[in-house]
Amino acid sequence: MLVSADKKWDYALGTIKVDGLEPSSELKKLIEKEKRGEMTTADIRKVLDKKYKMKE
């Protein structure tokens, strides 16, 4: 059984919230763009990697 992208994101965000955390507004905006087909999950990863990766 395949799970829709919406359900996958609902599950992922739910696991964050279980820990008492709230996803950033930036992440929520990226997820909405992915749901609308404006970007891919790989694009989201690139944006987050660029923002959060430590420089060597």
Image (cartoon, rainbow, N blue to C red):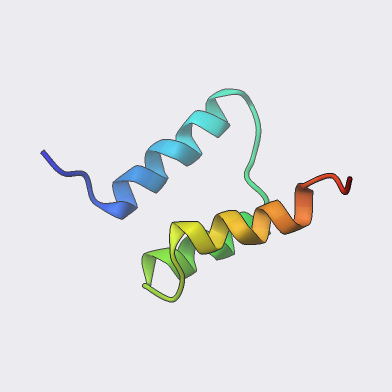
Q: Position of residue 32 (x, y in %)?
A: 47, 65
Residue occupying image coordinates x 31% and y 53%: 5
Number of marks drawn: 0
Q: Position of residue 27 (x, y in %)?
A: 61, 55
Specify whether 6 is left or right of 25: left
Determine the image quadrant of residue 12: top left
Q: Residue furthest front?
A: 56
46 or 56: nearer the viewer: 56
Q: Position of residue 45 (x, y in %)?
A: 57, 54
Q: Is residue 20 above or below residue 1?
A: above
Residue occupying image coordinates x 77% and y 56%: 51
Residue occupying image coordinates x 63% and y 45%: 23
Q: Position of residue 30 (x, y in %)?
A: 55, 63
Specify whether 32 is left or right of 2: right
Q: Residue furthest right?
A: 56
Q: Quadrant of the N terminus?
A: top left
Q: Residue furthest bottom?
A: 38
Q: Residue furthest left?
A: 1
33 or 14: nearer the viewer: 33
Specify whether 4 is left or right of 26: left
Q: Quadrant of the C terminus?
A: top right
Q: Is residue 39 above or below residue 45?
A: below
Residue occupying image coordinates x 46% and y 57%: 41
